[in-house]
Amino acid sequence: MKKIGITGGIGSGKTTVARVFEQLGIPVYHADYWAKEIMNTDPLVKQRLKEIFGNAIYNSEDKADRKRIAEIVFSDKNKLNELNSVIHPAVWLHGENWLKQHEDKPYILKEAAILFESGGNKGVDKVIMVSAPKEIRLQRVMKRDNVTHEEVEARMANQWPDEKKIALSDFVIVNDDKQLVIPQVLEIHQQLI
């Protein structure tokens, strides 16, 4: 079974592209989704995050206040590094257990926004990069997350630029609202199977 990474900057549409692969029967591990889940369910992760950020980052239902965490980490690189040092190992372990359930597939996708930045690309055989113009990405995230232009820019500043990721990727899907995504996915799918 081949492990294929799928990445792209915030708002690039990598989750949408991953859903197309899922429709083709390809299992997709959504690392960003599981990171959020683990923050809310793993007692050791919760304890460590409270030690780093204080109890106030969890609400009255003991769920992570992701907006508050984002405000902290996207303005303080050290806090972002501390957050990643807790979350990334937990997500990696969860992902390895998930992989065992899909060993019969020709390939699986591991979707992660910061695949290269976290070093996760070292654990996959190939990488698919989903690219979109910055202005489109900004608009998508502002609408999706109900955040300001400045908040999206701050998040983008913590990710590598598309050009750097494209240079390291095996495949590129352009999701610019002009080119059709499905034919691009089908072409890559045929090469991977």
Image (cartoon, grey):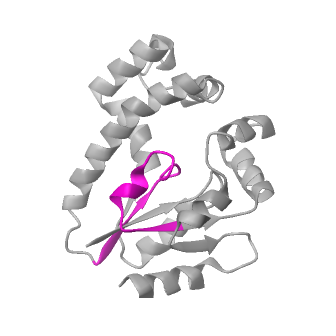
The residue located at (56%, 61%) in the rendering is: 14
Q: Where is residue 33 in the image (x, y as percent from the top left)?
A: 44, 47
Reply above or below: 152 against 70: below
Residue shown at the point (33%, 18%) measured from the top left: 47
What's the residue at 79%, 40% (across, down)? 149
**Which quadrant is the C terminus positioned in?**
bottom left
In reply to whether residue 61 is colored magenta, the answer given is no
Q: In terms of image quadrants, where is residue 104? A: bottom left
Q: Nearer the viewer, residue 146 or 61?
A: 146
**Residue 39 seen in the current view:** no
Q: Is residue 186 left or right of residue 138?
A: left
Question: Where in the figure is residue 40, as x and y percent of width and height?
Answer: 38, 31
Quadrant placement of the N terminus: bottom left
Q: Is residue 111 magenta?
A: yes
Identify the image quadrant of residue 61. top left
Q: Give the range drawn in magenta.
A: 106-128
